Image (spheres, rainbow, N blue to C red):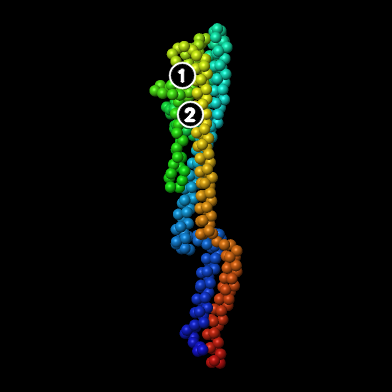
């Protein structure tokens, strides 16, 4: 091997090795500090692009899951109200049945009238208060001073923008005898009362003061206890249909929420598999590269010293 003071091949090789080791060491140190083997597009353009798309889907699925949580809250609140209304309707049935035991007492009938009107206003008030963030599924209009801005609920069910709707439940509670009649309150929709434009019952369909009248769902002005009781039972059936619909919607939303959480977890795991660094592997690689760096520096030092050895040839 010839010795030259102009060209030090050994130093060149040693420097190339040191530079390559430094580059690898820098990448490994970044992976250790960030926990990612692909932190930006320069690390792996294809993987970074796929991971970015998946991260977008994770954010989108998070919004879907939030919407499902809100839908669950609305339906749960409505279901609680509907169940409470069923309890009040049981009291209405008991009060209406009592009319048959007080046929000749104006005072007693007047008291029963007041009692029934109180129950019907409770039903309407419960329906009006079943509002979550402006959504109320138990009233038929938004033009009231009740902070009700929507009477149906539409929510996103998937990443591609699919939606589902929980319709207003007024229709499920509509008595056949009420079709074509303006309906202002839930108690009126149920065929038990006449309501006002504020959505509250103003009079029941069975009594006026201390006088028995024809049931609103009955025939003419002739009072019929059996028809009156049947009207209340029909209202109970209608509200049972409402709770059944709410129960099915609750189940649907719960299933979609479970699936949505699974999708979010799978996407997160997928991004991790693509971009996360294997820390045990990176630790071993770091130790190896640090050793190679030390050896490369030593090798370069030795190579640089060879030119000094040429001086000894001229002594």
Q: Which mark is residue 63?
A: none
Q: Nearer the viewer, residue 272 or 312?
A: 272
Q: Determine which residue is flagged by label 2.
A: 138
Residue at horizontal 59%, vertical 72%? 291
Any part of residue 195 in sight: yes
Q: Residue at x 55, y 83 (%)?
A: 305
Identify the residue under disc 1.
Answer: 217
Q: Residue 200's spot in the image, x, y percent?
A: 48, 21
Q: Earlier in the sequence, mark 1 or mark 2?
A: 2
Image side of residue 286 versus residue 149, left or right: right
Residue 56 or residue 112, whichever sits in front: 112
Asked if the residue at tag 2 contacts the one at tag 1, i.e. Cβ–Cβ closer than 8 Å, the answer is no
Q: Local crowd at mark 2 within 10 Å, few (<14), some, or many (≥20)?
A: many
Circle 1 or circle 2, nearest the eye: 1
Is 298 placed above or below 120 here? below
Image location (x, y in percent) of residue 92: 55, 20
**Residue at screen point 57% across, 73% down:** 292
Taking depth in this image into account, of 18 and 91 the one nearest to the observer is: 91
Q: Secondary structure at mark 1?
A: loop
Placement of 287 over or under 99, stated as above or below:
below
Q: Give left or right: position of 154 versus 276.
A: left
Q: Position of residue 306 (x, y in %)?
A: 54, 84
* Lateral position of residue 139 relative to residue 287, left or right: left
Where 292 falls versus 55 (above or below)?
A: below
């Amino acid at each position: 091997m010839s010795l030259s003071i102009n060209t030090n091949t050994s130093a060149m090789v040693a420097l190339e090795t040191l530079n390559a080791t430094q580059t690898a060491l820098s990448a490994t140190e970044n992976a250790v500090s960030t926990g990612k083997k692909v932190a930006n597009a320069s690390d792996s353009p294809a993987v970074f692009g796929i991971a970015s798309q998946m991260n977008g889907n994770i954010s989108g699925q998070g919004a879907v899951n939030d919407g499902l949580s809100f839908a669950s809250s609305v339906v749960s609140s409505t279901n609680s109200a509907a169940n409470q209304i069923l309890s009040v309707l049981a009291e209405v049935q008991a009060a209406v049945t009592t009319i048959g035991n007080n046929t000749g007492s104006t005072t007693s009938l007047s008291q029963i009238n007041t009692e029934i009107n109180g129950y019907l206003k409770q039903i309407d008030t419960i329906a009006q208060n079943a509002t979550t963030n402006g959504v109320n599924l138990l009233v038929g209009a938004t033009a009231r001073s009740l902070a009700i801005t929507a009477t149906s609920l539409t929510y996103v069910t998937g990443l591609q923008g699919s939606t589902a709707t929980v319709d207003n439940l007024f229709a499920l509670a509509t008595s056949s005898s009420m079709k074509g009649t303006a309906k202002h309150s839930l108690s009126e929709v149920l065929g038990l009362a006449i309501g006002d434009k504020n959505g509250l019952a103003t009079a029941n369909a069975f009594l006026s003061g201390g006088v028995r009248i024809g049931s609103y769902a009955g025939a003419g002005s002739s009072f019929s206890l059996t028809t009156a009781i049947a009207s209340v039972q029909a209202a109970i059936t209608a509200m049972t249909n409402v709770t059944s619909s709410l129960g099915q919607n609750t189940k649907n939303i719960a299933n979609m929420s479970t699936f949505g959480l699974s999708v979010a977890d799978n996407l997160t795991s997928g991004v991790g598999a693509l971009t996360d660094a294997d820390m045990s592997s990176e630790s071993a690689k770091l130790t190896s590269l640090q050793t190679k760096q030390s050896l490369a520096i030593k090798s370069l030092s030795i190579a640089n010293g060879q030119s000094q050895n040429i001086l000894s040839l001229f002594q």
